[in-house]
Image: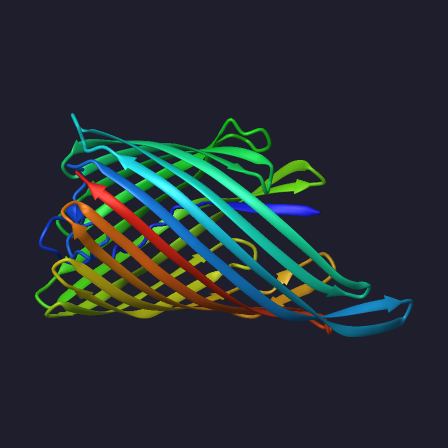
């Protein structure tokens, strides 16, 4: 049996979709704010986080079997279900003498069962993965508009039977009241299977503008990234990496009316990975902000497209990978200094592929959901 776990060492830089509040952004975690969050932390933060999720997948594939010149084709079904639970603890200090320290501890459990029909019958497999990670970070305030953040994370996965160590360095610079720049480098330390050193580097420009009735937000980023796949084959750990370049851009616009905001969010990205993947996403958003709570409803339609990919003996054509998402979020200030952040996400995905010039093809549909809760205390 081959067990594979993928670690995405990426710079995930996106437009902040925040909401104006009576207090500064730091004192209202999770609430929307049209103004950029200040870099200096002035309070201690303790947070407890939990997430529960699951998915179900169903599909069908057409395969061909040949004995000499006699070939026959048949259709086979495949299905899968999965469940996951994650628990986390976070502690961050304010900037004391310009220095802030933090720790994030996570524990995750995932269980998946997959069933596939074949020429010789039905194959069923069950995979269980337990992941434990700890992230130590420090940030130093060079000026009110400049911040440097460094972190080291240790991640242990029973699924791949491996431990990895990731370092990350970030630089934030607020150029003016509307424009900011961020840069990021990161990589591996003390790895037994892959070369250590830098694995990704990138930067982003972010623009934020708040008018009387409209909030505008945009970003543009470039990244040299690495996807690392860690496997266990018959109990022997293996790992591989794939480096690529990626460019992305997007933003949001929100129209304000009293306590409500009506918005549209969109972005796209392209990369030079195999098949030259191109991703486009867009969707509406509604936000309502009350004095002590906020609700938001966000829809997202994501289309991922690949070019034909040449294999040693054939060419594979992929259909568009289409994902539809619906997210409901509820944030509340329970009492002075205590905050609740909860959300429900439901998504639907469909994709397919076929070998050009043959009857071999595959298609599948999946439904995914997640329920997230977080409680924070600022003091």
Is 164 drawn above or below residue 204 in the view shown?
Answer: above
User: Quadrant of residue 355 in the image?
Assistant: bottom right
Residue 189 visible (yes or no) = yes
Q: Nearer the viewer, residue 184 or 73?
A: 73
Name the colour scheme.
rainbow
**How many marks are shown on the rendered structure?**
0
Q: Nearer the viewer, residue 373 or 348?
A: 373
Q: Residue furthest front?
A: 335
User: Quadrant of residue 218 in the image?
Assistant: bottom left
List x then y, in percent, for residue 149.
29, 34
Q: For the point 64% across and 46% down, which residue is it?
A: 3
Residue 322 visible (yes or no) = no
Is 137 drawn above or below residue 223 in the view shown?
Answer: above
Q: Is 197 displayed left or right of 183 in the figure? A: right
Q: For the point 39% across and 54% down, which residue is it?
A: 247
List x then y, in percent, for residue 213.
11, 68
List x then y, in percent, for residue 15.
28, 56
The quadrant of the picture occupied by the C terminus is top left
List x then y, in percent, for residue 281.
38, 66
Q: For the point 79% across and 74% down, which residue is it?
A: 73
């Amino acid at each position: 049996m081959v067990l594979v776990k993928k670690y995405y060492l990426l710079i995930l830089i996106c437009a902040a979709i925040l909401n104006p509040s009576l207090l500064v952004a730091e004192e209202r975690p999770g609430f929307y704010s049209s103004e950029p969050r200040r870099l200096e932390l002035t309070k201690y933060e303790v947070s407890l986080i939990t997430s529960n999720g699951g998915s179900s997948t169903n599909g069908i594939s057409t395969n061909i079997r040949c004995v000499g010149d006699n070939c026959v084709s048949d259709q086979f079904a495949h299905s899968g279900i999965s469940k996951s639970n994650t628990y986390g603890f976070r502690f961050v200090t304010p900037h004391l003498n310009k220095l802030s320290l933090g720790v994030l501890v996570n524990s995750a459990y995932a269980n998946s069962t997959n069933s596939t029909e074949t020429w010789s019958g039905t194959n069923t497999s069950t995979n269980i993965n337990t992941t434990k990670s700890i992230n130590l970070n420090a940030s130093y305030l060079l000026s009110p508009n400049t911040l440097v953040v460094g972190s080291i994370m240790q991640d242990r996965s029973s699924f791949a039977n491996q431990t990895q160590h990731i370092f990350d360095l970030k630089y934030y610079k607020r150029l003016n009241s509307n424009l900011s720049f961020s840069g990021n480098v990161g990589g591996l330390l003390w790895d037994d299977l892959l070369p250590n050193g830098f694995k990704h580097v990138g930067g982003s420009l972010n623009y934020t503008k708040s008018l009387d009735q409209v909030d505008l937000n945009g970003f543009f980023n470039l990244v040299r990234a690495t996807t690392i796949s860690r496997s266990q084959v018959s109990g022997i750990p293996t790992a591989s990496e794939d480096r690529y370049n990626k460019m992305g851009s997007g933003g949001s616009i929100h129209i304000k009316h009293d306590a409500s905001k009506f918005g549209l969010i969109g972005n796209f990205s392209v990369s030079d990975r195999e098949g030259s993947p191109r991703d486009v996403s867009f969707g509406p958003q509604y936000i309502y902000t009350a004095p002590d709570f906020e609700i938001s409803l966000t829809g997202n339609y994501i289309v991922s497209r690949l070019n034909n990919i040449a294999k040693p003996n054939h060419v594979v054509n992929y259909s568009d990978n289409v994902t539809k998402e619906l997210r409901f979020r509820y944030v509340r200030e329970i009492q002075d200094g205590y905050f609740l952040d909860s959300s429900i996400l439901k998504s639907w995905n469909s994709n397919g592929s076929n070998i050009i010039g043959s009857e071999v093809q595959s298609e599948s549909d999946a439904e995914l959901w997640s329920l997230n809760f977080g409680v924070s205390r600022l003091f």
